Each structure stands twice: as structure tokens, then as C-alpha cells.
Amino acid sequence: MASLRRKSPPAPVRDDRSPVRITVSGLSKSYGPQSVLREVSLEVQPGEIFVIMGPSGSGKSVLLRHVAGLEVPTGGTVAINGHDPRLPETRDRFALALVFQSGALFNSLSVYENLALYPLEHRLCPKPEIRERVVRALRILSIENAVHKFPSELSGGMKKRVAIARALVMEPQVMLYDEPTSELDPVMAATIAEIIATLKEQFSVTSVVVSHDRDLAFAIADRIAVLHQGRLLAVQTPAELRENRDPIIREFLRPVINLQEPRFKKLEANHD
Amino acid sequence: MNRINEVFEAFGSALILAWRAFRSLPSAPRILRRVSEQGYLAGYTTLPIVAILLFFIGAVLALQAGNTLRDFGAKQLIGTLVGESIARELGPVMVAILLAGRVGSAVTAELASMRVSGEVDALVTMNIPPERMLVLPRLLAVLLITPVLTIIGNIIGWFGGAVVCAGVSTIGVEPEMYFQALKQYLTVRDIMDGLIKAEVFGFVVMLIACSTGLRTRGGPREIGFAVTKSVVFSLIAILTLDYFITKALD
């Protein structure tokens, strides 16, 4: 048994926790005839909070999945400090955490086991230390009471908080969030915004956030990218973006709601 | 043409999955708990069905063969016929079919649901190979429990035959005579051949189940399709391999 243990994969070699740069060059993705991303190029600076916004179906989540190394690009490249994020070595080196929109918790494991899985599997530290890490993450997200529950017993918002706690336990250098505040009440959404900002300030974590939540984006972002139909329309600071004159961006950021003459009625009239 | 491509793709990805799973064998001590959980799920819960099915297969075999052999004055050979048929053929095949229907379908549904809900992607981003966490424990578990299930199934099947031989007056073969004939002609080689078959079938069933589950894309509808596909492919694989293994072991 002892000899077999020695042959087990060694604990991952972590980079020196220097901030990480993400480079996306000419990224294209098609699913059959449907083009989802078209020649997207951007660079996320080390330690930056980079928010990707855009209407539904604009390719935000697909872009995030490429950064996480979960998709094979049709064209172009994604690099984390020059390394391909699809390679296990890159993930070992930079501890890349993705908070899924659905939470993607392991249904057969309790909340504690979900959180402890990464450090246990990678043998990052002894069990008491893992326990400390887990308890700390649960406390930050105010979900200590859920520690022995299973994901099926949690609400959507709770699942999201557990998913964020699971990512925190990984102590990542790159945090990717897919709609982190959806299904959360305003207080918890503000807490998540604070967590994202704190990770940047204290640990220089590079964060990429995909969100519909304009308040969140303008509150935390160093820069915001706007995607529309798979194309990158702008990458600007929140202040610059507020002044942007592009009609699509203006329409997305300040939708006009006229309940006296709703747009869907106009659409219906056009179809008739 | 698309269908043919699909079959080759499925075959190729199953082989790659097996290779990746066994590449993480050095981590086996760390997954012992998962292996035992899967062994319990696949073995202990399947055992009652294996027992019922093999008992009645032995019984039916004795009933069918008994009347025919009696007409030829060879009813003392019923034990041999039932023993050989179950050990070499029906035991391993029936255990594999039950594994495909009961365990393989459940594994496909579970892994497909994990794939669809993003759990498998979560493992990948955490740099925990799904092959190590999800596939290897199941393959090791099935390799451990299939021979055990087959041996127990064989013994129960033989008893099923003995009960019919003793209980049906038109056959009227005493258990002593039945088991004597069974022992006289049944060799260790026959039993081992059956166990080799069972081991191969069990492995292939679990590999198809895991591979089909992990390749699922879409939603609940696709999970249902994946389960059907997994069971159908498994049954085809069992019966096709049965011919070739029988030929090779002859």
C-alpha cells in the first residue's frame, strides 16, 4: 500500500502566485453552421476584474468556457500567462476556478465534501487544514448551516453560494464567474461583489465575470467588454462605457421601457 | 454513413476512456472507498435478481432437457447438460445482461446527468480527471464483482435444475444422481472459461455505460436516449463477443 501511495500523482506545482494575464487572440467558435464567437481578441491584465456583458446569446458564457479550457476553439487562441488553459499542467500551475451559473455542485456529495474535494484530491494540505479552509469559506458566504446538507436540499441561491465557496477553497489565481449574482437577493449579490473585489485587493486574483447585472458590473469592474452576436463591440472602463455613443451599447445599458406602447406589440403589428 | 461514423466514434472514445482510466491506476488506493461503494451498488443490489433469474433458467433448462433426454434413455445426463450450459454460457451471459439492464443503465443515467448539469466540467476545471473519479472506480468494481455474481448465479442455477429434476415426476432424477453427473463432466476449465467471459462482458458493459454517459450533450431527453443507447450497445456487444470468446476458448 505504501509503495502504491508513493506512485500517486504528486501535489500540483503552484506558480509563485504572481498575478495572471489572460490573452484571447482572434477567438472564433462555431457549432455546425452557427457562429457563436467571431474573431474576439482581448487581454485581461494581471489582477484585473474584467466583466463581460452582452445580451442573451451573445456568446459570453462560451467565451468564458474557452478561458476555462472547456472548449476547443474553431479559430484563434486563449492563453493564461502564455499557457493553453486546456492543459492539465496549466490548471495545476495557476489554480483556475470557475463558478458555474447553475452551481454545478456534485449531487452525490455533501456541501462539506463538495468544498473539500479539490484540496483532498490534490493533497494540498493536511485534513485539519482543509477543514479550516472549508469552514472559512462557508463563513464568508454565510452558509455554515448548510455544511452537512446535500445540493438537492439547497435553494438556487444557496447552491450559487456553495459554488463560490468551493471556488474560494481552491485559493485560485484566476477566478471565472458565470452570472455570479443571478438567483441571489440584493444583499447576497452585494456580498459577492465585495468578495470579488477583496480577492483582487488582497490576493491579486485575476477575475473574469460574465454578468447581466449592470449594477454589479459598474461597481466592481476595472474594464467591461460588451459582446453582441459573437463580436466584441467595446472594451472600456465603466466611466468610458457610460459615455459610449454606440447605439447597440446604449440600448443594452439603458433599455427604454415604454409600457404605454410596448415593443412586443409593435413587433406583433409588424408580423400582422 | 453518419450512423457508421457514430459507431466508430463511440468505439474509439470508449477505448480512449479505458486507456485514460487505467492510466490513473496508481491512484487506486485513494479511490478504494469509491470502488467499494460502486461494488456494493453493482453487486449486492443485483444479486437477488441474478439469483431469481439463474434459478429459473436452471429449472427451465432441466425441464426442457429432462423430457427429451428421458425419451432417449439418457436422463442421468441432465446434471451434465444443465451444469455445462450454465457454467459456460448462460451464467455469464445472463449476469452480463442483468448488469447492462440494471447497473449499466443507472451508470449511464448518472454520468449523463452529471455531464448535462456541468458537474463533469466542474471536475475538469478543478483538474480532477473524470476518468479517475468517475470511471476507474466503476471499472474496478465491476471487475471485482462480476466473477462473484457469476459463481453465485451458477450455483443457484444448478440448484434450480436439481429442484426440477427431483420435483417433476416425469423426469424423476434424484439430486445425488444429478450432482454426480454434474461433477463428473464439469471441469474447472469450463468454470474458468465462463468466468473469463463474465469478466470481459462486465468490463465492456461498464465501459459502454460510462462512455455513453460522459458523451451525452443536451438535456433530459438526451439522457433518456443515452440510457437506451447504452443498453442496446451493451446487449449487442455481449452477444457478439460471446461468439468470439467461445471460439477463442474452444
Image: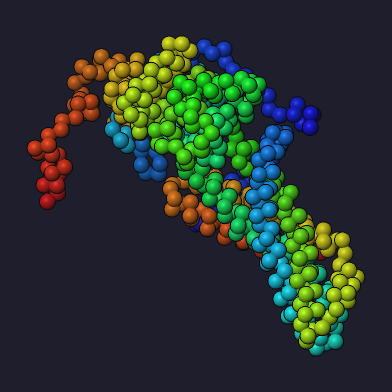
Q: How many marks?
A: 0
A203 displayed left or right of B181? left
Instruction: Answer whether residue B16 is visible to the viewer in this image.
Output: no
Could you say where residue A246 lies in the image, as x and y percent from the top left? Answer: 20, 24
Residue located farthest toward the left when viewing the structure as drawn: A260
Residue located farthest toward the front when viewing the structure as drawn: A145
Say above or below: B45 vs A89.
below
Say above or below: B115 vs A185.
below
Viewer-proximal residue among B132 and A194: A194
Who's the residue at 52% across and 58% down the image?
A: B228
Viewer-proximal residue among B7 and B239: B239
Q: Which of the 4 image quarters holds residue A180? A: top left
Who's the residue at 51% across and 47% down the image?
A: B112
Q: Which of the 4 image quarters holds residue A228? A: top left
Quarter of the picture holding the N terminus of chain A: top right
Who's the residue at 51% across and 20% down the image?
A: A136
Could you say where residue A174 lies in the image, as x and y percent from the top left? Answer: 48, 20
B190 displayed left or right of A134? right
Viewer-proximal residue among A120 and B232: A120
Who's the residue at 57% across and 20% down the image?
A: A132
B18 displayed left or right of A18? right
Residue located farthest toward the bottom when viewing the structure as drawn: B71
Instruction: Answer whether residue A54 is visible to the viewer in this image.
Output: yes
Could you say where residue A88 lies in the image, as x and y percent from the top left? Answer: 58, 28
